[in-house]
Image (spheres, coloured by chain):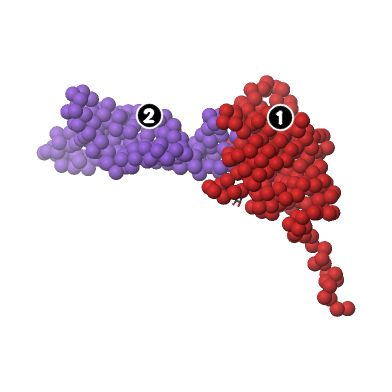
Chain colours: A purple, B red
């Protein structure tokens, strides 16, 4: 049989399916990233608390997220939780939950780092002009931290996009899984299918992640002025 | 009644007794300069007065009202006590004008037009009106400190605290900042100033408080303190700033 080569990508509705898979990947990553940023900022501020117990609890959460692989978290929520509670959660919802738990912890640590790296005088100057703590955070600490946060946050988001490939393990058909399916059904007609399909997926990841890094670098340069 | 009254103030840092039984008062319109060796507790004392540091015993009264109670709303007290620090402490992400307006608008919730007018007037007085849309990094150290002073003044404080505001400045910029403070003194602003500029202290102070090892060891009028210090410690301290005896040709051992 003749090798289809690159044509495997446009054969049938393959391209459509691959893009559909990509959409699922992106959706999980974007929703999780937004949740992570929204929860990560207050979590990071709580992490700077003077209270030792509060700091200990935060630290434990962060370390737990770091030590236990994302894959295990996915299994816990997808297979473990239904066993325990009888509630079955859909794969993509589990994915968002797990990525948000992970992202919130990492985002929190970034925020903690950014806030504590600000000179102490910034906070005190805010106090000295009679601002309340909430006002100090809203007008002084957070706006300044955001600039310092940018590189780490972008890094986290691209890491999230890439790590979404793990969600196939709980049955979510994202772009990598679609790729495998395409390869399986075409491998006899086209032995080089895997090269083209995986190559294309590599390209897809690249065109998503690269503009994000580029945008971040632009923003950083502009803020530096 | 004194504007500010400090009675029997004691302050510890983890068991280390930094301020020992400090008592003094400042009348409205008075300029008090606090002198003393490095580490004697001058900064800590100023920081206690506007609640940046907790005190372990004693009282601080503003207009006769005790302000260091558990129920004290420090953010309200601090609107009446302006403070300028040694480090350039402007908010780097805001322009000069935004820096100045932040407190009056957000803390005092004043009318924007009125505050803007006052801010422009104050900036004009310190010669920086043309810099109002600059960012702090575009200003020299002396300009930044003048903006920091304006930022505090725009809150209409009853008392101003200055903690070595010229100590990190290049020598040629010290004067422009000190001039602003002299001007304020002339206008009757009540101020407590920590400085190492002795000539300035002499010129601006109504009274000198000499702090050593966390204790007030001498209180005197400015003239009196510099010409006739009572304590040995104050004498030694003043000698550090005195270079006369090292001048060429005055060396006692020099043979002619
Ligand atoms: N936050 C702090 N924790 C512990 N010790 C401190 C702290 N701040 C100041 N000190 C100590 O208190 C003493 C007085 O410091 P400070 O008020 O800064 O002196 P000054 O301003 O007269 O140089 C110094 O011995 C200093 O080391
Ligand atoms: Mg000091």
Residue B175: percent from left, percent from top: 78, 47
Which residue is at a point 14% across and 38% down the rendered structure image?
Answer: A187
At label 1, counting other C-alpha atoms closer than 10 Å, the crowd grade (few under 14, some 14-19, many 20 or more) is few
Which residue is at a point 44% across and 38% down the rendered structure image?
Answer: A51
Which residue is at a point 80% across and 54% down the rendered structure image?
Answer: B229
Q: Quarter of the image holding residue B205?
A: top right
The residue where tag 2 is placed is: A35
Q: Nearer the viewer, residue A32 or B167?
A: B167
Q: Nearer the viewer, residue A45 or B128?
A: A45
Q: Quarter of the image holding residue A20?
A: top left
Q: Which chain letter goes with mark 2?
A: A
Judge left or right: residue B47 versus residue A110. right
Q: Quarter of the image holding residue B251?
A: bottom right
Do callouts 1 and 2 point to residues on the same chain? no
Q: Which chain letter goes with mark 1?
A: B
The residue where tag 1 is placed is: B64
Judge left or right: residue B106 versus residue B211. left
Residue B250: percent from left, percent from top: 85, 69
């Amino acid at each position: 049989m003749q090798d289809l080569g690159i044509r495997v990508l446009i054969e049938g509705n393959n391209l459509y399916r691959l893009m559909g898979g990509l959409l699922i990947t992106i959706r999980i990553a974007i929703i999780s990233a937004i949740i992570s940023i929204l929860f990560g900022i207050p979590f990071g501020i709580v992490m700077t608390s003077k209270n030792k117990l509060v700091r200990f609890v935060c630290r434990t959460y962060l370390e737990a997220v770091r030590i236990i692989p994302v894959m295990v978290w996915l299994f816990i929520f997808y297979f473990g939780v239904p066993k325990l509670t009888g509630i079955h959660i859909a794969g993509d919802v589990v994915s968002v939950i797990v990525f948000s738990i992970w992202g919130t912890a990492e985002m929190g640590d970034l925020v903690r780092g950014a806030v504590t790296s600000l000179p102490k005088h910034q906070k005190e100057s805010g106090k000295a002009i009679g601002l309340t703590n909430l006002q100090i955070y809203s007008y002084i600490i957070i706006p300044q931290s955001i600039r310092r946060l940018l590189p780490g946050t972008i890094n986290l988001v691209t890491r999230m996009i890439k790590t979404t490939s793990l969600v196939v393990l709980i049955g979510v058909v994202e772009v990598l899984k679609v790729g495998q399916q395409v390869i399986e059904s075409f491998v006899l007609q086209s032995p080089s299918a895997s090269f083209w399909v995986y190559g294309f997926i590599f390209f897809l990841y690249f065109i998503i992640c690269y503009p994000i890094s580029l945008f971040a670098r632009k923003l950083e340069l502009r803020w530096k002025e | 009644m004194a504007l500010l009254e400090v009675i029997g103030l004691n302050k510890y840092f983890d068991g280390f007794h930094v301020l020992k039984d400090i008592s003094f008062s400042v009348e409205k319109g008075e300029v008090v300069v606090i002198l003393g060796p490095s580490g004697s507790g001058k900064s800590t004392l100023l920081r206690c007065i506007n609640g940046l540091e907790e005190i372990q015993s004693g009282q601080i009264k503003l207009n006769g009202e005790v302000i260091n109670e558990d129920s004290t709303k420090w953010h309200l007290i601090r609107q009446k006590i302006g403070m300028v620090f040694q480090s350039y402490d402007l908010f780097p992400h805001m322009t000069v004008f935004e820096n100045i307006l932040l407190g009056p608008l957000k803390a005092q919730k004043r009318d924007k037009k009125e505050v803007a007018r006052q801010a422009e007037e104050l900036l004009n007085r310190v010669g920086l009106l043309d810099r109002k849309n600059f960012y702090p990094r575009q200003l020299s150290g002396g300009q930044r400190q003048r903006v920091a002073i304006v930022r505090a003044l725009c809150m209409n404080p009853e008392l101003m605290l200055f903690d070595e505001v010229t100590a990190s400045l290049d020598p040629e910029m010290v004067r422009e900042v000190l001039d602003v403070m002299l001007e304020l003194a002339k206008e009757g602003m009540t101020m407590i100033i920590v400085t190492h500029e002795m000539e300035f202290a002499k010129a601006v102070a109504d009274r000198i408080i000499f702090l050593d090892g966390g204790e007030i060891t001498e209180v005197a009028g400015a003239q009196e303190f510099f010409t006739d210090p009572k304590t040995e410690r104050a004498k030694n301290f003043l000698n550090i700033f005195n270079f006369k005896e090292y001048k060429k040709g005055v060396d006692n051992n020099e043979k002619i």
